[in-house]
Amino acid sequence: MSSNSVVENSADQDVERSVSFDYSELLNRLDSFFHSQHTRTLEWRKAQLKQLLILINENEQALFDALQADLGKCKQEAYVTELAYLKSDIKHQMASVKKWMRPVKKSTPLVAQPAKSYIYPEPLGTVLIIGAWNYPIQLTLSPLIAAISAGNCAVLKPSELAQQSSALIAKLLPQYLDENAFAVVEGGKDETSALLSLPFSKFFYTGGEQVGKIVMRAASEHLTPVTLELGGKSPCVVDSQIDIEIAANRIVWGKFMNVGQTCIAPDYVLLAQDIADDFIDALKHAIEKQYGKSPKDQEEYGRIINQRHCQRLASYLDGQDVILGGQIDIQEKYISPTLVLNPNENDLIMQEEIFGPLLPIIVMPSREAMLTFINKRPHPLAAYLFSKDEAFQSQFLEQVSCGSVCINDSSMFMLNHELPFGGVGTSGMGRYHGKFGFDTFSHEKTVMKRSFALENTLRYAPFTAFKKMILNRFIG
């Protein structure tokens, strides 16, 4: 989950302006501890993961309060999408890290025998994790869990837009985790620029495309590997062969959770023409059922991160056919769940990742038109298809390139630790979650161990005709 290309977490495009902070001493200190070999042990990794779990368990109410202050999240949504998610991730990593750390045996060709070949996973070093504001606890700590599991030190830069969550992370982390290995830097553009100027062993950034480009440029100075978890306009195709009520409920849940401020939320719906009226009615009913007639008064319905982004979203409705919602209170950072019918594809609402509670619905004449519409746009982070037709499901999987696909539901793939999460093209690069996170923060070192026995001199010059024949037969 990440912020969109308009809504950057640590800065707008001027994030790379002059550096006025120097964190080189901090990086040197963490690097020194990393080179002490402490982080390579299974015991240290599991101890840090356990401490992170204790941090969450002992400070649940403080974390709830921070999320309520920053985003108006109700306790249940905050628990499910942030705290419970993290606790499940930690437990999965703790149960699996011993196995993941083991060298992986590989076969050895006959010409190299006698020998053993294997892949040896090793930590990268000290990594920089730049979090996002829309899920400010989860999206900052989830990469940290993977970094710890892989045996790294880390500097965390939470988003300054989620002020209470950032401050709480900065306060709590040193109380629970090894201060020799982990640090939190708060701040905005200048602090982020200063961190990006340093030779970290990896940059892990969650946010929007524009700052993602800045992170990549900074990484190029030191040839630092990068994982970018970005966003995009995630399409939701609604075929005529569906259970209308169930599909509507699932789309409303995925779209309006966290007031639409979710990078994998359905960004727009492409709707089959022959069920359009019935499905739109079902969407309206599902919104009222889940959020009531007055969502502003419902505990379960949160708020936009700040007034600036509330105004941005409000501007997307100019000249649109709003068929439900559209109530806006900039002062209160409130926008009601809103349905927009058939916007022009050149309108801002169809050009920018929305990242809010506005759902455009475009009625389409055919499945082919839907696929064409999606494929002439940049690769999305997620794509959704609601259809009982298995042939169409297969066609969708083959023709739509995206980070993740969910068929007949929205966002549920995030709950499976066995599935990687990440984008493709402008929606990101690299992946994490579960073993994939461990791999992201590890280097897979190639190892071949040979014996001094049975020396084979065929490879040594001079090359006789016999040597050439044998070598070419076994190597070619």
Image (cartoon, rainbow, N blue to C red):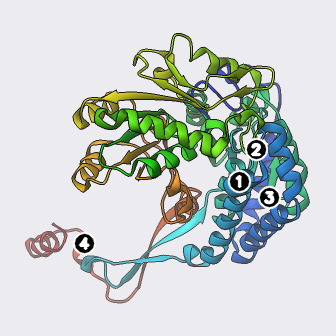
3D distance between C-alphas at marks 1 and 3: 24 Å
The residue under the point 84% across, 62% down is 55
Q: Which circle's residue, 1 or 3, is located before the other in the chain?
A: 1
- Residue 324 lies in quadrant: top right
- The residue closer to the viewer here, 395 or 288, is 288
Q: Secondary structure at mark 1?
A: helix
3D distance between C-alphas at marks 2 and 1: 10 Å
Q: Secondary structure at mark 3?
A: loop
Q: Which circle's residue, 4 or 1, is located before the other in the chain?
A: 1
Residue 423 x, y percent position in the rendering: 47, 44
Residue 144 left/right relative to 162: left
Q: Which mark is residue 181?
A: 3
- Look at mark 4 in the image and give the residue it sits on: 459
Nearer the observer: mark 2 or 4; the answer is: 2
Q: Is residue 25 visible?
A: no
Considering every residue shown, the one lying at the far bottom of the view is: 453
- Look at mark 2 in the image and give the residue it sits on: 73
The residue under the point 79% across, 64% down is 52
The residue under the point 77% across, 36% down is 297
Nearer the observer: mark 4 or 1; the answer is: 1
Q: Which mark is residue 82?
A: 1
Quadrant, the N terminus = top right
Q: Does the CB distance between marks 2 and 1 fall below 8 Å?
A: yes
Label 4: few (<14), some (14–19) or many (≥20) C-alpha neighbours in 10 Å: few
Nearer the observer: mark 2 or 1; the answer is: 2
The residue under the point 87% across, 62% down is 176
Q: Does the CB distance between marks 1 and 3 fall below 8 Å?
A: no
Identify residue type, mark 1.
Glu
Q: Which circle's residue, 2 or 1, is located before the other in the chain?
A: 2
3D distance between C-alphas at marks 2 and 4: 67 Å
> On screen, 441 above or below 232?
below
Q: Secondary structure at mark 2?
A: loop
